Image (tube, grey):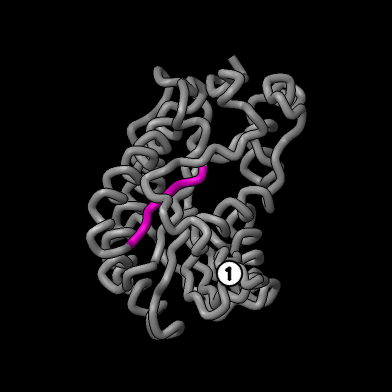
Amino acid sequence: MTSNVPTLDLTGRRILVTGGAGGIGLETAHLLIEAGAKVVLNDISEESLEKACAEVGAAGALSANVADEDAVKSLIDDTLDILGGLDGVVNNAGVFEPIKGTRRQTLDDWRRVIDVNLQGVFLMSREASRHMAPGSAFVNMASVAGLGGFGASNGYGVSKAGIVMMTKTMACDFARYGIRVNAVAPGVIEAPMASAIFDKVAIGSDVYTRRIPMGRLGKQEEIGNAVLFLLSDRASYITGVTLPVDGGWTAFGGAGDASA
């Protein structure tokens, strides 16, 4: 019997991954390339990008600040030159502000996080969508911090909540062009950003795992697999969704600040 079920094969798909020089972005790019996609990596550090590109066999690596409008326009143009088109974008670039609490948070702290995490997704989506055909897709990187109060880092949680809503509004907007928009909301993941947070607040990962029904931190490839699915034809009727990949964190009601 011939199966009509779409596969997770992304052969020939042309995909741009921001924040792709390390962590979840790099692991996601690796999985996309293994699935047959042609991938361009973006990040802010040229040196890190060169190493990452060589590690996963990406089609190209482009340094640009996603919070800068002119830089994003150039990034999209350069990506099109390398790939010859664009079928998908993973808006993964993001930063985490110093953990201070609202009273000690500076306006510069706030602006940096909002500019990169939220404005960056807007600029990337606006510019890239102009070159994307029906059947293309965006996957935005949200967070469980955007699904519940996260007092240790006000700007980060707000920026990720903004991504959740932007995913919905852009899904409604871009549907007329045949472009899907979804998001993934990672829980606490074994990744450089999480390690930095643990070190900063001087707590162990066990503080978090006690709130995770599955009893462990997530792995970077588990986030990448969710991105792969949402970019694939198996998700052809899914748009406007934010998918928590969190071991049950949000189901348990653990989206609040575990360091509190």
Q: Residue at x 38, y 42 (%)?
A: 163
Asked whether 183 falls inside the magenta stretch, the response is: yes
Q: What residue type is labelled 1?
A: Leu
Q: Residue furthest top?
A: 260
Mark 1 burial class by Cα count in 10 Å: few <14, some 14-19, many 20+: many
Q: In this view, does 38 lie above or below 196?
A: below
Rendering coords of residue 216 (x, y %) = 76, 32
Q: Which quarter of the picture shows residue 178?
A: bottom left
Rendering coords of residue 250 (x, y %) = 56, 26
Quarter of the figure with the C terminus: top right
Rendering coords of residue 214 (x, y %) = 74, 29
Q: In this view, does 231 lie to the left or right of 34?
A: left
Residue range of the region highlighted in magenta in the rendering: 179-184
Q: Nearer the viewer, residue 203 or 80?
A: 80
Asked whether 33 falls inside the magenta stretch, the response is: no
Q: Which quarter of the picture shows residue 29?
A: bottom right
Q: Nearer the viewer, residue 14 or 8?
A: 8
Q: How many marks?
A: 1
Residue denoted by label 1: 49
Note whether residue 43 is visible: no
Q: In this view, does 172 lie above or below 247?
A: below
Q: Is residue 64 above or below residue 251?
A: below
Q: Which quarter of the picture shows residue 55?
A: bottom right
Quarter of the figure with the N terminus: bottom right
Q: In this view, does 72 lie to the left or right of 194?
A: left
Q: Is residue 79 above or below residue 260?
A: below
Q: Which residue is drawn at 48% across and 20% down?
A: 151
Note whether residue 233 is visible: yes
Q: Which residue is drawn at 49% across and 61% down?
A: 231
Look at the numbered disc 1 and give the secondary structure of its residue.
helix
Q: In this view, does 131 lie to the left or right of 30?
A: left
Name the dominant secondary structure of the magenta segment.
strand
